[in-house]
Amino acid sequence: MMLDRVLSGDLPRNRMLTAVLIAIVVGLALAPFVFPGAKALNVAAKICIFIVLVASFDLLLGYTGIVSFAHTMFFGIGAYGVAIALTRLGPSWAAVGAGIAAALALSFGLSLVIGLFSLRVKAIFYAMITLAVASAFQTFASQLSEITGGEDGLNFKVPEMLSPGFSLAQQPFLGVSLDGKLISYYLLFAITVVLFLVMLRIVNSPFGRVLQAIRENDFRAEALGYRTVVYRTFSNVLSAGFATLAGALLALWLRYNGPDTSLSFDIMIDILLMVVIGGMGTMYGAVIGATLFVIAQNYLQDLMKFASDAAAGMPLLPNLVHPDRWLLWLGILFVLSVYHFPAGIVGRLRGKK
Amino acid sequence: MNTPLLRLEGVHTHIGAYHILHGVDLEVARGELTVLLGRNGAGKTTTLRSIMGLWRAAPGRVWFDGEDIAARTTPEIALRGIAYVPENMGIFADLTVRENMILAARGAKRAEDMDAKRLDWIFGLFPAIKKFWQHPAGLLSGGQKQMLAVARAIIEPRKLLLVDEPSKGLAPAIIQNMIAAFRELKQTDTTILLVEQNFNFARQLGDRVAVMDDGRIVHTGTMDGLADDEGLQQRLLGLSLAAHQ
Amino acid sequence: MSSPVATTLALGALPAVRLDRLPLLLLPALALIALPLMGSFSTWVTLTVAGLAMGMIIFIIASGLTLVFGLMDVLNFGHGVFIALGAFLATTVLGSMADWTASENLLINLLAVLPAMLVAMAVAGGVGFAFERVIIRPVYGQHLKQIMITMGGMIVGEELIKVVWGPQTIPLPLPAAFRGSLLLGEAAVEKYRLIAVVIGLGVFAAMFWALSRTKVGLLIRAGVQDREMVESLGYRIRKLFVGVFVAGSSLAGLGGVMWGLYQQNVTPQMGSQVTVLIFIVIIIGGLGSVGGCFIGALLVGLLANYTGFLAPKVALFSNILLMVLILLWRPQGIYPVANR
């Protein structure tokens, strides 16, 4: 079946899951028309970007079994690549291309080094070291204010077709004005779909299967003749590459980038939450996790505000449900997920433990 | 006192996906030294570790002094009077010989608390222990470490000793020392289950013998019985005692 | 027969017991290298004391973590929670004793700070007990899950601190008699820093005594090397581990109080902010080694202060640089614990 080939044979395999996924895809595809307003579009764009970012992390964690806290670093490299290029070289497609190319080159180089180093040390060491490296990089980026704009970040113009001022047509179409923002969104959406399908292809290829074998039992894989070193490094590099592309998309959408936008440790935690709650090692988990998380981040808080106001006057309770404390509840959900739903929402739906 | 001190009944042990022990039935008689023979990979070490609770024996039962200990934790099993001398000796290299011994003498907080007579006896068996009392155990030679490992197992009286290949990698002279020490140990009516690949070593100490292959016991009997029957030796172990001298 | 006889016998048969003193020389070496770079001796003294004080506090915080890892192979990414908890508790306790802390009398100040420390240690220890039981115990041996779940514990912990104390930075002023500096010759040395060094040395001495002179300490040292063998000797190492975990959390709480006073303010993120730093320290020291942790912490503290003065831009990477250099020299850290 055609769908089978597009999804590289990795079907959702569950009715509920399929329904949810279709709803998400359709929702994102029609977002500008179905959910009016700038905030809604922002949420939709963010979901797309995080789908790519989280899926790339799943490739590393869920399929290869490597915990790395350096993922936001590559995200940031992508964002800064585009940001710096557009700031320095002006708002042109060539600049975008140059920025992405430079960012990918840096990411490939760094991930290669980190990957080769990682294979000598135990998983825990590796996790700690990536933490240190990412933290150093973040400081580094905010120090080089000449290039990166320091703490303030960089504001820049994007190619004309993507900028809000641009209009494709005078009349709005179905209530939505056909401006640069719309074009940007659909470019984002299209690229997200393509990148996701590519990643799906990768994890379902023979390469992907070897990764999973390594994740299960690396001694065995080595004994079977697979050079785990090579495969792990490859996985590292690929994962970093996709994260970099996600970063580039982020920069193009926001027309701004700063150390907190893409490099902050909070984002790393968010990714971790999304991939675990959604379901590690499933790819679709990234879709579910990202959607759930971003929507919660933006709309759950309103709900919590309501509850917090209602509970005003009682000790502690208003603080517990205060909208700023939404991470507390997600954190608890995360901990529960690791214990009871190690396969996340997707795994649960599919009936696995 | 005729019931065996230790009896394994249909013991299976799985390690991950690997099924190592396939229904082991073994009896160790009180006060005797039983040798567990077999090729590499036959499952001898696994058997000891399963008795000790380091690996789970399931399904199956492990009867020790009338109690099934198969589901017990390692510390509980040790406290019931079983001492274990593993293949790698388990010496705490950064600790001194003295500290190693204090740990083994469970009731002792300091060296003074140990049973002086017993310690003297051990010093007599293994002079090196006395000599290097204050030295980090990691600096001892292989043979000395092995002696320390055995000394730790006997500093307090135990009902059962599980010893895994004590002669491995030792020079012949040291092996003779070891044999002498074990002979003295046997005098104290301790029950010993000894895993060995060195048939000569086993022959000199063993009262009874059990042979393992592929995770099962394939022969049990007296040591004399096996030693006198070259054909049996060939069949079970692929060698003869005479050739091994 | 219990008197050690070995020393009177010929020691020629065994290679001389060489205590690995080389890493200890790193500390004076670093200090001496920095001296000519400073320009003035008094600046050097000030910075060295500051560095040692910072190092001591880091040691107090990190020592529990390294033992927990060495003993049970558990890496607690949520260790920072206890630090923050301790610090915030200090604000509450000291806040309620404002007139005592305002007094210029050193003794009265100490009588105010002491309860703050004890409360911090007790509560952090209690929370540690719960943390071990609820968060860590179910995932023994599964490193991947451990990393994630302790991280989750950290997130939840931080948010709960915000629930109780609010999300903003709270000042934690030093008690009056702790403020200011002493003049040693021409060098101005902050009083609090000297106090921190004294407390740090006290904690180190206590740990050293406990580890080398008590049976529990013996068990910990043995357990770090070979857990299975300790169990085979009949000791319930699980219980020991809970004890060590609680002690480590307690110490982190104490460290939190001292860190808060050092910075003179506390934020809910202070735990996660130092997480990277303490990981670097325990990697440098060798996972499981208290002595290594001590040296590593002091090195990091000294380096941070020296580079902070000489080349602030480098200061942020100095830790990582130090870690890389040490790992190139000894890949398992300064004092690798004998393998299991």
Image (cartoon, grey):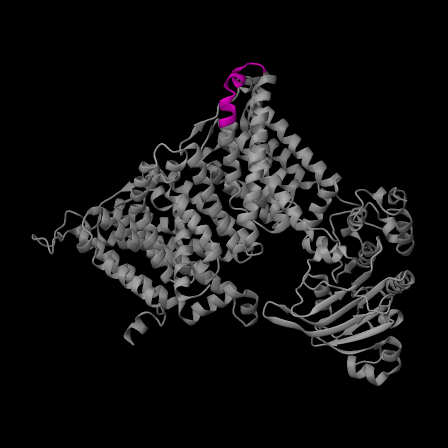
- Please state if A13 lies on the left or on the right of C285 as rendered: left
Establish if B26 lies above or below C32. Answer: below
Which residue sits furthest left? A170
Q: Quadrant of residue B160?
A: bottom right
Residue in the foreground of this view, choosing between C169 and B242: C169
- In the rendered image, is residue A257 in sight? no
Q: Quadrant of residue B195?
A: bottom right
- Please state if C47 lies on the left or on the right of C171 as rendered: right
What residue is shown at x 83% (from left), y 65% (from top)? B192
Quarter in which the C terminus of chain B is drawn: bottom right
- In the rendering, at what x and y percent does residue C250 appear? 59, 37
Quarter in which the N terminus of chain B is drawn: bottom right
Total number of numbered discs in the rendering: 0
- In the rendered image, is residue A38 in sight? yes
- In the rendering, at what x and y percent does residue C230 appear? 72, 52
Task: Give the dominant element type of the magenta stretch: helix, strand or loop.
Answer: helix
- Please state if B186 lies on the left or on the right of A10 as rendered: right
What residue is shown at x 34% (from left), y 51% (from top)? A293
- Please state if C149 lies on the left or on the right of C118 as rendered: left
Residue in the foreground of this view, choosing between A137 and B35: B35
Which residue sits furthest bottom? B231
Magenta region, residue range? C92-105
In magenta segment, residue C320: no
Which residue sits furthest top? C104
What residue is shown at x 23% (from left), y 46% (from top)? A39
In magenta segment, residue C98: yes
- In the rendering, at what x and y percent does residue B37 appear? 78, 73
- In the rendering, at what x and y percent does residue B4 appear? 82, 69
Establish if A197 lies above or below C294. Answer: below
